Image: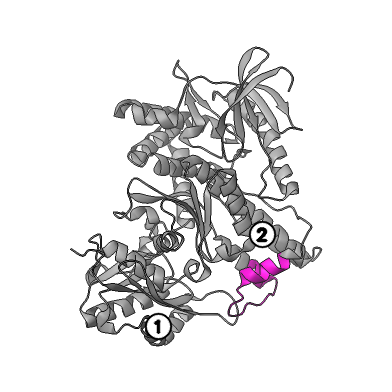
Amino acid sequence: MDEVNSPMLIKKGAEANLYLAQWHGREAVLKKRVPKKYRPIELDHQIRTYRTIHEPQLMSRAKEAGVPTPTIFLIDVQNTTIIMQFIKGKQIKLLLDEIGENERQNVCFKIGELIAKLHENGIIHGDLTTSNMIMNPSGRIFFVDFGLGEKSAELEAKGVDLHLMKRALQSTHYQFAEDCYRSVIRGYGTLVGSREQQGILEKISEIERRGRYVAERKQEVSD
Amino acid sequence: MIDKTVKGCCLGIESTADDFSVGITTFDGKILANVIDAYIPSEGGIHPREAARHHSEVAVKVLKEALEQSGKRPKDISIVSFSQGPGLGPCLRTGATVARALASYLNIPLVGVNHCIAHIEIGRLSTGTTNPVTLYASGGNTMVVAFAAGRYRVFGETLDIALGNCLDVFAREAGLRQAPGLPFGAVIEKYARQGSKLVRLPYAVKGMDLSLSGLLTAITALLKKGDCRLEDLCYSLQETAFSMVTEVTERALAHTGRKELLLTGGVAANKRLQSMIRAVAEEHDAHFETVQMQLAIDNGAMIAWTGVLAYTNHIVTPIEKSFVKLRWRVEEVEIPWMK
């Protein structure tokens, strides 16, 4: 934690607090997983430590896979804190509401491609929402917040990941969620190929049928 | 059409799962009656057909009691509402049939109500919250919901089994018994208070959602192995499952920035869950409310009240469109009474 100057709270999330700070003269983000009073100390400690160690690992693997992520500067396990590069740019969550239809679909297509890159390299993001994606001024999309991620090559994990993306679009961008999701899947498909894409789509609908109250189970509805 | 000053009242019928209930509320939100009759299987879980049989057996008795409690005669009732979904098919159909018959006989409008939305609406009415983030956790549902742009949106939910279901199945596996007034959840809570050793269990928060089936499998395996005290298992089950639910609730609260947090559903009775959710509310400077038990479990009053909200906003359900919807998601329902 040496050489951290003037930290300023920029976001109080559910899982961690984010501070903007100067670290060795650079702008950095301090991600501190603060203790949660609601859960037992033991469990709380386990969860925070696990996520502090695993998140940077996944981020650097994602970067190797060609998915832009902030560079990790320092991991302080004891204080469950990660210091990383600050990405200047705009959250995709805000961006999608501001741009035109064509551009919006292009952005979603690109997001789909990036998710495919993660999945092809056995990385599950675990929290694919438009709040966790940032576009920098040169148009590169950075993925952040891998705290709920895991390493897995299983179709099930990939399916849940994309299902979460769909759910996030539906709850945050309900006006154009469907078109955006379609573009994400198209972008995903161009990388993984149509066979793999078909497989994942079938998996997603299986996950949805397993879940709560999905209209696709309409055959059960009768009276 | 109808304004709320009219001295009307609505009779609501709830029958989505193991409870058959009739409630009566006035158009201005007074609860005149709320009679609940629970089906308790002698062993195993709820068999939809057996529960439906229970409902048809007790329907007339419960209806009569509710009318007596309210001091109203059938001709005083202005509308009939019923739980149209989501829920168990045979159970829903039994309630729907009673509702249709009553509405036709009295020649008054029928209103189909979404069960999950009714939970939120009676919660808002009874606690005075206006625009809360709601955690609704019961035997059949576990979801975090908040209103946005004309509808209630799900900000987190279980990807597989419900929280109450997870507790119930474990309780049955452990050979625990439930009784009227002492459901499995309460029995587990009692044991958990005597527990102290936290057993490591799968913690599965997936983005905004959570998964409980892996946890149930793991703890059932530990139970069968027999190395752990039942008290410690109940404690670990509660702590782990509730922590997951609380984490997704906190996410929704942080995401929406709302200043009210409402806890409802049968599992809302659990004091430990209450304390966890309260802690999150305090952390985010939000006002915390738990819905009182008779209105937090499945009940007719919530159906009656939501029927009033719908009807006074010009929503009625013609008989030919009153088929039950087993998998009716909350996002599908337009909510004209919220701004």
Task: Output the chain of dot 2.
Answer: B
Q: Is residue B170 magenta?
A: yes
Mark 1 Cα-neighbour bin, 10 Å: few <14, some 14–19, many ≥20? some
Instruction: Kindly give the residue lying farthest to the front in the view shown.
Output: B5
Q: Earlier in the sequence, mark 1 or mark 2?
A: 1
Q: Position of residue B127 (x, y in %)?
A: 46, 60
> Can residue A190 be seen in the rendering of this structure?
no
Note whether B326 is above or below A85 in the view shown. Answer: below
The residue shown at (51%, 80%) is B39
Instruction: Find residue A190 and name its label.
Output: none
Q: Position of residue B55 (x, y in %)?
A: 43, 81
B5 sits left or right of B117 in the view: left
Which amino acid is tagged 2?
Answer: Gln
Q: Nearer the viewer, residue B251 or A134?
A: B251
- Whole-number angstrom distance, CA of label 1 to CA of label 2: 37 Å
Closer to us: mark 1 or mark 2?
1
Q: Secondary structure at mark 1?
A: helix
Instruction: Find residue B69 and name its label.
Output: 1
Q: Is residue B160 magenta?
A: no
Q: Secondary structure at mark 2?
A: helix
Instruction: Kindly give the residue lying farthest to the right in the view shown.
Output: B227
Instruction: Kindly give the residue lying farthest to the left in the view shown.
Output: B1
Q: Position of residue A133 (x, y in %)?
A: 49, 29
The residue shown at (69%, 34%) is A52
Q: Nearer the viewer, residue B45 or A86?
A: A86
Task: Specify the segment rendered in magenta.
Answer: B169-192
Instruction: Find residue B238 and name its label.
Output: 2
Q: Position of residue A160 (x, y in %)?
A: 52, 45
Q: Nearer the viewer, residue B133 or A166?
A: B133
Task: Output the chain of dot 1.
Answer: B
